[in-house]
Image (cartoon, rainbow, N blue to C red):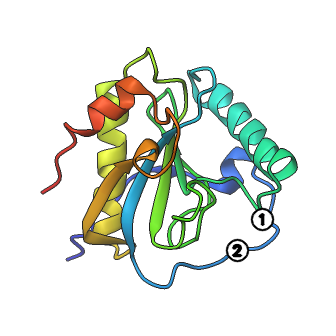
Amino acid sequence: MDLRVTVEVVTREQWGAVAPRCRETLKCPAQRVVIHHTALLHCRGIRECMDQLIHIQTMHMQDRNFDDIGYNFLIGGDCTVYEGRGWGVVGAHTKDNNHDSLGIAFMGNFNNESPSPAALSSVKQLLQCGVSQGHLHPGFTLLGHRDLGDTECPGERLYAALKHLKFP
């Protein structure tokens, strides 16, 4: 019997991602999870979120010269989990902190808006899935982007909510 936790994820192919210029694999399960917000408008519904993902990937690759979208996963305003770079891939989300971490961005601006309980549940399920499948170290550290850099990210309200995310 397979006891691994699973979560439904909209794949890169499903949302229309372009191929990355290159990919670097993490050398071991991620030790840390860094939570971000996109600081863009809140997307509601799969079509609106997928359009925003395409915009974010284009911005990251063209304006910031990243090899791909910077995050490993994103949580839409519809509480859907979207694959960014995916499991086991080095991201471009937190300068000098990408080789042992997973970057997850909540889509929206969480300086004044709070993440929904459903969105927090989605990220919790994703992280439990990562642990059960061996992509994420069971004793991982959960951080907000501001813990590792001079930024407001992931926004006041999302950062405050991170304290209430409990893992078994």
Q: Residues within 10 Å of mark 2 (few under 14, many from 20)?
A: some
The x and y percentages for residue 117 are 29, 27
Which residue is depicted at the point 52% across and 78% down? 26
Q: CA distance from mark 1 to mark 2?
A: 7 Å
Which residue is nearer to you in this view: 162 or 120? Answer: 162
Furthest-left residue in this view:
168
Above or below for 36 versus 139: above
Say whether marks 1 and 2 touch (CB < 8 Å).
Answer: yes
Q: Taking 92 as reference, is 121 left or right?
A: left
Kind of residue indicated by mark 2: Arg
| Residue named by callout 2 | 23
Which residue is nearer to you in this view: 135 or 90? Answer: 90
Which residue is depicted at the point 75% across and 47% down? 57
The x and y percentages for residue 155 are 45, 28
Furthest-top residue in this view:
112
| Residue named by callout 1 | 20
